[in-house]
Amino acid sequence: MLSDQEIIEGCVKRRRAAQQQLYDKYSRFLLGICLRYSSDMGEAEDLLQDVFVKVFLNIKDYAGKGSFPGWLRRIAVNTSITHYHRNMKHRYHSELDDDVLPAGQTEMPDDYTFSADELYGVLNDLPPGYRMVFNLYAVEGYKHREIAEMLNIDTNTSKSQYSRARSLLRYRLEQLGREARRRDDGSE
């Protein structure tokens, strides 16, 4: 396999073999990013296609400053944000029903480990605005001020969305843990 620099040079010259190697090397990494910002695998795959179109069209602009995977990640995140803006009708305003979260927060069970599929499922069930802000803040590491600028929202809205996402995640993970313990208790 070629080095990233050789792949980049081949892509700048629009060589199909280099484009295929770039896709083969980074598609799983970028799909993982797209999955965090989409509601299902089909939407994530559509986002991934958009990401690669942008990469192939703009790879000549990659200046070699910073890591190449970081440059690709940034394109994936920005493409996801653009997609989100384009497709959301009621963004940031889905409120939790009063009966969804209990009044008091309980501790997470120490004796239960969640699988990657369980965690992905819980994250994917978040309302889109919550999921977007949670991913940008907790996973990508952006500050609320930066998120607010990217999403054209108030900084306090970003903080509120993140707080609500965390509360909802905690509650749903607690439910998952209780269900698992009930299954375990029933089978013994």
Image: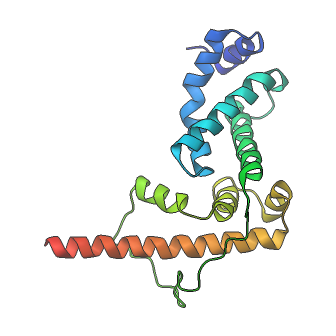
Residue 158: image location, x then y, percent: 76, 68
Question: Furthest-front residue in view?
Answer: 89
Residue 84: image location, x then y, percent: 72, 51
Q: Quadrant of the N terminus?
A: top right
Q: Is residue 73 left or right of residue 113?
A: right
Which residue does the image show at 39% across and 76% down from the upper left?
A: 109
Which residue does the image show at 53% across and 80% down from the upper left?
A: 100
Residue 149: image location, x then y, percent: 86, 58
Residue 115: image quadrant is bottom left
* Numbered label tally: 0
Nearer to me, 67 or 152: 152
Q: Is residue 127 left or right of residue 85?
A: left
Nearer to me, 84 or 134: 84
Which residue does the image show at 54% across and 34% down from the upper left?
A: 28
Nearer to me, 53 or 32: 53
Q: Is residue 121 above or below residue 83?
A: below
Which residue does the image show at 30% across and 70% down from the upper left?
A: 180
Q: Is residue 135 above or below residue 80?
A: below
Question: Furthest-bottom residue in view?
Answer: 103
Q: Is residue 27 left or right of residue 108?
A: right
Q: What kind of colouring is applied to the model shown?
A: rainbow
Question: Furthest-left residue in view?
Answer: 188
Residue 22: image location, x then y, percent: 62, 22
Residue 49: image quadrant is top right
Q: Quadrant of the C terminus?
A: bottom left
